[in-house]
Amino acid sequence: MAEGPYLLGIDFGTGGARVGIFDTEGTPVVFGEQEFSLKHPRPGWAEQDPDEWWERLVVAVKGTMKESGVPAGEIAGISVDATSSTVLAMDEKDRHLRPAIMWMDVRSSDQADRIAGTHNDALKYNGYGAVSAEWGLPKALWIKDNEPDVYKKASHVCDCGDWLIHRLTGEWASSINFASSKYYYDRDEGGYPESLYDAVGAGDLLEKFPKDVLDLGAVAGELRKEVAEEFGLKAGTPVAEGGVDAHVGALGLGVVEPGKMALITGSSHVMIGQTSEPIHDPGFWGAYTDAIIPGQYTVEAGQSSTGSIVAWFKNQFAGDAAAEAKRRGVDTYEVLTEWAREVPIGSDGLIVLDYFQGNRSPYTDPLARGMMWGLTLSHTPGHVFRAIIEGICYGTENILRTMRGQDFEPKLNVVSGGPAKSDLWMQMHADVSNVPIAFTKVSEGPVLGSAMLAAVGAGIYPDIQTAAEKMVHTAGTIEPDQERHEEYRFYVDRYMEAYPRMKELMHKTERHVAERKP
């Protein structure tokens, strides 16, 4: 093992805490992970226990340190990323007054509608459109409206990442990344939009937020002695301010300059890009001021269901592929991919809308639904599998076209996540959108991004851009094929025409189904 110093990154996700130790060149030494439990006390609700968070984190850090063999004194810095819009209410003794309301919780839909009804200019951050019940402000407002005793006792209302920084350092500070992307903080306009908060009766909430709003990588404080003893680390180690898991993941993919975009894949797609100018438009979120890099703006968009649709098809309708895979001793996806490669571009006229769980971008339509059209008796499972992946790629291109309408032209998509392992899928993304797709050596973008912020906080690198230059390394690039791109244009256009024509029917049918459910 090379000599230190080393950096420790903490990725605080929905499913658990992931800890990684890296050297100053971004080479991973070891990873450790511990799971969290998730409770759903009512439909649409999701909560976690902060005490369990801490217990699992202690186990993860101690285990990772032990496995690494790195001396505690060689850890030069620590930083974190966490789920965003995961809201906590803390009393004056730093005890949580209720379980944390998770980012996915949508109990605050009425509060979200109330915020949207103000038509305040701060709503530019959500494209002047609908306000998501997943955001932090509606959840904090829900606590005030529905649990007034909790709200009154709360000395601090904060996000998960703020809570974690406080537990590590004893300091109350928020990240500009959390504050801007989920609570409408805009440094260009002086900070939190008081007019918006006052309009929804939440002006006093600003008094409960952490007073300091720090840039990513700024030192929030030093590791407390009692925490250092629990973790097996050195007291006084600098702890750098972190941010939203997906945004810090974009850092771990090297998205630190205007025009560059991260495509983070999994059960859904998240796109995070940097611009040099503030752009706001229905169809994407942002651009958030200084949210990742000071002097730049961050845009965000996403597709609600992508990898989850592929998994749905494999699990529900790919029995023949599964049987062949079993006979050959390979994965079912490998067989389906082979079949899809034999199908021509456009899947012989079969087009899929990927709105199986609604549309996040660019329509923000929770009542939109998935759709397959153009089916004939000649279509095979290979056609359907290919058409699903093509439809997902068309959905990504739809978002990119929306952004291009605001003069934002992505220079390079940097990809991580499970679907990134599919050469067929990634080549489709490159061809459909006519952009190169790059891959990094370390696929665990969030935990590497946290380690990069730790390096900045420790003074190893002067800024995030330098940390990215030294710690993020490209493993390969897929280039678009111009002929295939031209062929795909016809099908992308048909994909984009389908939703406006079907929207009313989708809404009528979904409302009818919802009314009939017990």
Image (spheres, rainbow, N blue to C red):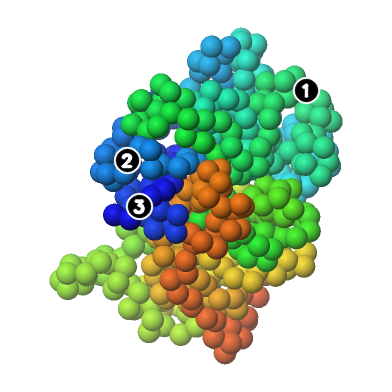
Q: Which residue is more in the foreground, 375 or 397?
A: 397
Distance, label 1 to label 2, CA atoms, is: 47 Å
Q: Which mark is residue 203?
A: 1
Vertical arrangement, residue 500 with respect to residue 450, above or below: below
Q: Residue at x 33, y 48 (%)?
A: 31
Q: Amino acid at mark 3?
A: Glu
Is tag 1's residue or tag 2's residue first in the polypeptide sequence?
2
Specify whether 65 is left or right of 300. left
Is tag 3's residue or tag 2's residue first in the polypeptide sequence?
3
Specify whether 59 is left or right of 309. left
Q: Which residue is mark 3?
A: 3
Q: Is residue 445 visible?
A: yes
Answer with the quarter of the image where residue 57 lies. Answer: top left
Q: Residue at x 65, y 42 (%)?
A: 215
Q: Which residue is more in the foreground, 243 or 515?
A: 243
Q: Which residue is more in the foreground, 503 or 230?
A: 230
Distance, label 3 to label 2, CA atoms, is: 10 Å
Q: Position of residue 30 (x, y in %)?
A: 32, 50
Q: Which residue is mark 2?
A: 71
